[in-house]
Amino acid sequence: MRTTVRFWRWRRNTLRRRSDRAEAWVVLVAAVLLCLGAPAAGAVGGLLMAGDAPRAAAGWHQVDAVLLHRSPAAPMTGWGALGSDSVRVAAEVRWTPPGGSPRTGEALVPPSTPAGQQVRIWLDPKGVPQADPTDPTQAQARAVVFGVVTGTATALLVLGGRTAAVAVLNRRRFAALDREWAQVGPTWGHHPA
């Protein structure tokens, strides 16, 4: 035999309290946010991350450059800490653009590269060094990871908010029960003769 009634907080019942209705709304809002809000937040976060990835624009081209000084070591933060081969650091280089005179400037090169070594750098149509465009597969992987993390964080935030709201409602229920018991308790068990 079944002893629980489904959706009892939504049915008309004289024993239903305002806090029961409030808890039903909190649970409903949390369920909607978990089912719709968390995936939407993850998708938006992933799309924003994918949109921020540097891409080669029209007219960009690669040239060979010579490193003038040893490049610094790789920083141990961000994606570089994950052992990615695409980590670059800024260093002074000299290059000759097609049909131009030698130029010197700062470009992104592999870390810890010795001075005098030849490296490939990206130039825009004006001959200014640019950041390496992201590999599409790598950009997509980063976007997926960022989307999953964003969606999970949103879900945890919703669950934390629901837990906090139910805790407040329970505290109010216990306080109301204490007040009612303070009125009824002294007369409990006393029967008029």
Image (spheres, grey):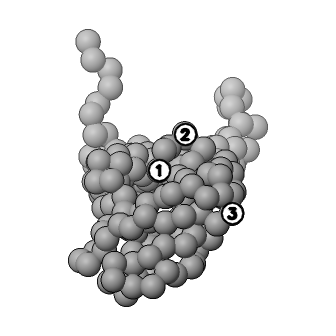
Q: Which badge, 3 or 1, comes first in the chain's sequence?
A: 3
Three-letter amino acid code at disc 1?
Ser
Mark sitting on residue 69: 3
Do labels 3 and 2 touch, CB within 8 Å? no
In this view, the residue in front, 34 or 24, is 34
Say which element carries label 1.
Answer: loop
What residue does disc 2 label? 83
Is residue 160 in sight in this rendering?
A: yes
Placement of 190 over or under 99, stated as above or below = above
Identify the element where label 3 is drawn: loop
Q: Nearer the viewer, residue 168 or 18?
A: 168
CA separation, marks 3 and 1? 20 Å
Residue at x 39%, y 78% (from the top left corner): 97
Provide residue 6's location: percent of width, then percent of height.
27, 34
Mark 3 belongs to which amino acid?
A: His
In terms of secondary structure, where does tag 2 sit? loop
Quarter of the N terminus within the rendering: top left
Q: Residue at x 29, y 48 (%)?
A: 137
Residue with the mark numbered 1: 86
Measured as percent of width and height from the top left, residue 42 is found at 35, 54
Label 1: few (<14), some or many (≥20) within 10 Å? some
| Left or right of residue 61: residue 109 | right
Q: Quadrant of the C terminus?
A: top right
